Amino acid sequence: MNNRLKMINQLKYPKEFRILPLKMPLEALKQLEELIKNHTKTAPLSNVPLIEKEANKEFLAEVSVGAWRLKKKMIDVETGQPFDEMNRTYRHLESILLTLEKEGIEIQDHDGQQFDAGLSLKVLAYQPTPNIDQEYVLETIKPSIYLKGDRILMGEVIVSTFIKEDQRN
């Protein structure tokens, strides 16, 4: 479609929605076209050197924690499936989590994991629990976040522990 027909076609729309013709010098337009032709592929996020800076690692960690928290609120614990009212939204969240995973982000939830004092976790509290055989992570407050195998955020947990004899009475 030539420019004149494009301008006439715009008249059928309300004035505030009309797209005005581009007023750009011919040389600048040719340079832009050349740039678009030469720029065939963008570099993935992992190849961008800025990702290695601490501020960006913190940002990625916080985005990952937020996505993990959303997922925990959207999933039915019994079925492992999203709640009916969350189905549409959950698909978008899955897309975000998949993108993070493709870029080398691993989100590690510790719920139910056997606890050992040597684990690299920040224990926020110990919860005495009756009738347990071993200590385990009762609840993950923040998951551990890894970027290409390197930890960028230490997980924070509540640990279920044995009841001491003097607390039973």
Image (cartoon, rainbow, N blue to C red):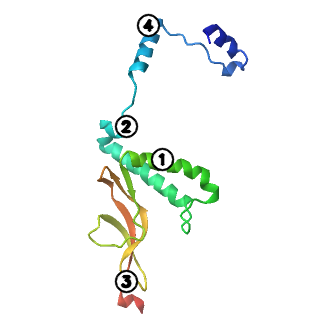
Q: Which residue is mark 3?
A: 133
Say if mark 2 contacts mark 4, CB within 8 Å. no
Q: Residue at x 40, y 83 (%)?
A: 132
User: Which amino acid type is marked by label 1?
Assistant: Ile
Q: What percent of the width, then of the height, locates residue 42?
A: 39, 31
Q: Which mark is residue 123?
A: none
- Per the model, the C-alpha gap separating discs 2 and 4 is 31 Å
Element under label 3?
loop
In the image, residue 102 above or below residue 43: below
Q: Nearer the viewer, residue 102 or 161?
A: 102
- Neighbor class of circle 2 (other Cα within 10 Å; few <14, some 14-19, many 20+) is few
- Per the model, the C-alpha gap separating discs 4 and 3 is 77 Å
Sequence-wise first label, 2 or 4: 4
Q: Which residue is mark 4?
A: 27
- Per the model, the C-alpha gap separating discs 4 and 1 is 40 Å
Query: Which quadrant: the C terminus?
Result: bottom left
Q: Which mark is residue 44?
A: 2
Say if mark 4 contacts mark 3, CB within 8 Å. no
Q: Which residue is mark 1?
A: 96
- Per the model, the C-alpha gap separating discs 3 and 2 is 47 Å
Q: Nearer the viewer, residue 63 or 106?
A: 106
Q: Nearer the viewer, residue 142 or 28?
A: 28
In the image, residue 148 above or below residue 12: below
Quadrant assignment, res 121: bottom left
Q: What percent of the width, then of the height, locates residue 148?
A: 31, 49
